[in-house]
Image (cartoon, helix red, strand yellow):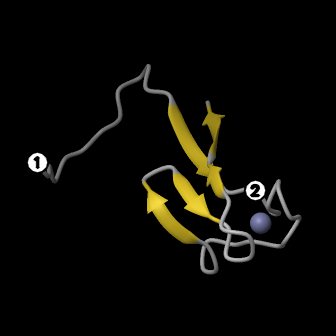
Amino acid sequence: MESSAAEQPAPDTVVVLPRLPERCPNCGGSISQSTVEWVGPTTVRCPYCDTPISLKFERMT
Ligand SMILES: [Zn+2]
């Protein structure tokens, strides 16, 4: 990856932020970025029931 000191976003760039659900959809356990296990760039695993959870992406415009 290249790193630029003068990095400027393009005007039409759509920024999407990954959003971790507050609770596991399977067991309802409270999860956070510090408690889940990251198994992929957009996937975490519930520490309670080991269910893989895909992050939701929220558009920031
Ligand atoms: Zn769970």
Residue drawn at x 68%, y 60% is 51
Which sits in the foreground, 50 or 28? 50
Tell me if mark 2 has few (under 14), some (14-19) or many (20+) residues whose alpha carbon lies within 10 angstroms of its own. Answer: some
Tell me if mark 1 has few (under 14), some (14-19) or many (20+) residues whose alpha carbon lies within 10 angstroms of its own. Answer: few
Residue at which label 1 appears: 2
- Determine the image quadrant of residue 11: top left
- Where is 7 relative to 61, above or below? below
Is 1 on the left or on the right of 24, as rendered? Answer: left
Please state which of the two labelled residues, at mark 2 or mark 1, is closer to the viewer: 2
Is 38 on the left or on the right of 58, as rendered? Answer: left
Q: Position of residue 9 (x, y in %)?
A: 35, 35
Residue drawn at x 65%, y 67% is 50
Pick the quarter of the image with the C terminus. top right
User: Is label 2 in contact with label 1 (beta carbons under 8 Å)?
Assistant: no
Residue at which label 2 appears: 21
Res. 33 mark:
none
Furthest-top residue in view? 12
Is 23 on the left or on the right of 3, as rendered? Answer: right
Q: Mark 2 and mark 1: span between their CA atoms?
A: 32 Å
Q: Position of residue 57 (x, y in %)?
A: 62, 39
Is 6 on the left or on the right of 60, as rendered? Answer: left
Residue drawn at x 63%, y 33% is 59
Q: Position of residue 49 (x, y in %)?
A: 74, 70
Of the image marks 2 and 1, the number of the one nearer the N terminus: 1
Figure quarter occupied by ligand 1: bottom right
Q: Position of residue 14 (x, y in %)?
A: 50, 28
- Where is 35 relative to 58, above or below? below
Furthest-right residue in view? 28
- Determine the image quadrant of residue 47: bottom right
Q: Amino acid at mark 1?
A: Glu
Q: Amino acid at mark 2?
A: Pro
Secondary structure type for disc 1 = loop
